[in-house]
Amino acid sequence: MEKISAVVITFNEEKNIERCLLSLDWADEIVIVDSLSSDRTVSLCRKFTDRIIEHQWEGFVRQKIFATGQAANDWIFSIDADEEVSDQLKYEIVRSKQAGFGAMAYRMPRRMFYLGKWVTHGSWYPDYKVRLFNRNHGRWEGLDVHEYWQPAGHDQKLKGELLHYSYENITDHMNKINMLTSQAAAEMLQKGEQASYWKILVNPLIKILKSYVLQAGFLDGFVGLVVALMGGYYVFLKYLKLWELRKN
């Protein structure tokens, strides 16, 4: 029977890490790669594992490449510190392991908890992510803002959800949008992308309408509207910052 290493990258995650690690009691190994946290993250992690490696932050893609390489097993479950494995997902992973993996990678839906409510529509759901995979059959790709595991071949879907607790409140959400759009604009500049007035003004509106109307965000009520507006604001700020970088 194949063994699975759960791999987590951390930085100042004392508010989230215990919830995450408690949901990994099924894993054969838990590996933490910490980017020199200044809070209680590392001490809390020691309650669950002694496989804690300190590694200077290199960006999401390179950090996850490094972390995946620290595992003792070829089968990896990659989870972020602000995520939690649901009971159904745990059951499916254990059942797949016992039966023998039928694919080299598995993707699962991720559900966001936002403003006191689980978001079940719009651009945030089902938000499928490949998180269980054989590290010999694929690689980490993408920009540092949107990294992802690209399997070498077909992957299978699981029904159990990853539960995501990304934002404490509106202020936290705004702060993260500010940080992530700066990174995204810098990466877009390196790729030679342009920031036309059309992209700055129209693309955010398209994002809002797609999330709220086409993807049925309105079914989540006021929270669905906030998610759509925040998504549009992210797109607006990303292109505006790219415009500023090109102007300077």
Image (spheres, grey):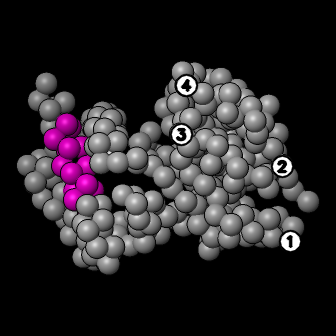
Quarter of the image with the N terminus is bottom right
Q: Nearer the viewer, mark 1 or mark 4?
A: 4
Sequence-wise, the earlier of marks 3 and 1 is 3
What is the quadrant of residue 175 in the picture? top left
Does 237 appear above or below 59?
Answer: below
CB-based contact (under 8 Å), mark 3 and mark 1: no
Q: CA distance from mark 1 to mark 2?
A: 16 Å
Mark 4: secondary structure = loop
Location of mark 2 (residue): 28
Taking depth in this image into account, of 164 and 197 the one nearest to the observer is: 164
Location of mark 4 (residue): 39
Name the residue: 36% across, 58% down. 115
Identify residue type, mark 1. Ala
Does 62 appear above or below 216?
Answer: above
Location of mark 1 (residue): 99
Sequence-wise, the earlier of marks 1 and 4 is 4
